[in-house]
Image (spheres, coloured by chain):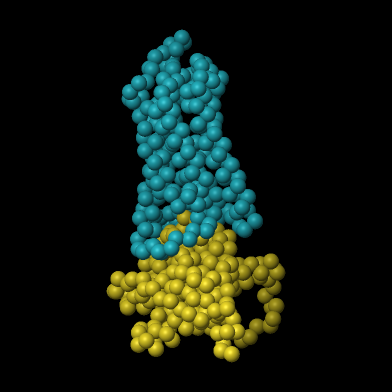
Chain colours: A cyan, B yellow
Amino acid sequence: MEFLSTSIGRKIVMAVTGCCMVLFAIVHLLGNSSIFAGAGGINAYAQHLHSLPLPIIMGFRLGLLALLLVHVIFGIQLTIENRAATPQSYAVKATRKATFASENMIWTGLLLLAFIVYHLLQFTLRVTPGLTLTNDVTGHFDVFAMVASSFSGFAGVGIYAAAMVVLFLHLFHGIQSFFQTIGWNNDCTQPVVTKIGNLVALVVFLGFVAIPLSIFFGVLKG
Amino acid sequence: MSAHQDHNTMTINLVVWRQKNANDPGKFENYTVNGITEHHSFLEMLDVLNEDLIKAGKDPVAFDHDCREGICGMCSQVVNGMPHGGQERTTVCQLHMRTFHDGDTIYIEPWRAKAFPIVKDLAVDREALDKIIQAGGYTSCHTGGVADGNAILIAKPIADEAMDAAECIGCGACVAGCPNSAAMLFTGAKVSQLALLPQGKLEAKQRVKNMVNTMKECGFGNCTNHYECQVACPKGINVKFIARMNREYLKAQF
């Protein structure tokens, strides 16, 4: 298909898959924030999710996996092409509009991929060491205890906090980039879209990082 | 009184990219130019250097230039890492030495992109941009005789926006400034200019597809929305035209 071979076509696919994953991250954050209602909150939320019909759960997981793979593969492919299109860099580097975030999308992206693998090994497959895997008083799996056990140490919290900084950088450039790539931009909307995108990136960062930090500093107790 | 005494003259140190041909690896050479006044344009300063080199029996620095009025799009030099020297809405031929100081060291490099092979020194082959134009930068409707003025009514804001896009002089600074060597601002300006006007709307879908395909065939990179092109553009072409091209490309699929 010609659309998937051209520069703009593949970038539009990157934009749409990226947008879907940002929307997922926001829903994920809203769901996770049930932890602020205590152990009962997050455990009830987890039970609700797991009580959904298996085809829905698996379909959703496969859909997310497909979005991720397409985004990653096209991202790597486009970056390789961009490097090849610029065989020699300038002796004097004078960047004026590009940001640290925009110049390092491939690296923040690959770090996020590594984090997602770790995150799934930890909380979905539950195979990382040091996790408390027990049932709560209602006899269901105690998600809160598992989360609390992983955020009790400096390393556990550090990995999550660092990953959220990386996510912030990726979204700082990514969200406004979506509107430009999909063509929903002009000179009036661009500065506004950029500011709102940066704000959303900040809110997502603060929201996610609040969970491990509040557990680590003892603000949140079961 | 000699001409030099009329002004405070400057001595400028130049670090210039020298490359014999496309296959030569090329290297930087250091030069010192004396007697430069604030009224010298950047290219006139290079003319002084070349006269010195010719007198010394050396090969002068090859660089592209034509009108020296900032409208033809021939001049193409990256000065201190910035295409055209970084002054807002200024081609390098219109950049004047008053923006520099006595004793400054200035790096001069050619446009660097795989799609723009170096011909010699600072002169690059920008035929790739012509290929993009050949792929769709025209209207092929039969025009007949000279039409009456205002026979086709075009709203003022639309005409203004098309004219803003048409300001592009095709110099390639957007490609040179882009960390990915993408030609999106150039192509976006050309696609937008024609897509906005009734004469160009007829072939809008095929045009954007052909021009976007040709960008890839010519070896340009992909846009990652750094917006370095917009600040590099000596005509101030806005990245909104890239968004418009993206929109036109998406529309062309249906």
In this rendering, does residue B237 appear at all?
yes
Q: Is residue B240 above or below residue B55?
A: above
Q: Compare residues B91 and A27 and report the one nearer the observer.
A: B91
Q: Is residue B166 above or below residue B225?
A: below
Q: Is residue B124 above or below residue B208?
A: below
User: Where, quadrant-wise, is the N terminus of chain B in this rendering?
Assistant: bottom right
Image location (x, y in percent) of residue A171 = 50, 44
Image location (x, y in percent) of residue B58 = 35, 84
Query: Going 49% across and 58% down the picture, which residue do you hit?
Result: A95
Q: Is residue B6 above or below residue B219?
A: below
Q: Compare residues B218 and A51 and report the one nearer the observer.
A: B218
Query: Going 62% across and 69% down the picture, which residue do you hit?
Result: B164
Image location (x, y in percent) of residue A116 = 40, 35
Residue most toward the top? Answer: A137
Q: Compare residues A147 and A91 and report the one nearer the observer.
A: A91
In this rendering, does residue B253 appear at all?
no
Horizontal side of A203 relative to B175 (left or right) equals: right
Query: Going 50% across and 31% down the picture, which residue do you hit?
Result: A209
Q: Compare residues B92 and A49 and report the one nearer the observer.
A: B92
Quarter-wise, where is residue A9 in the image? bottom left
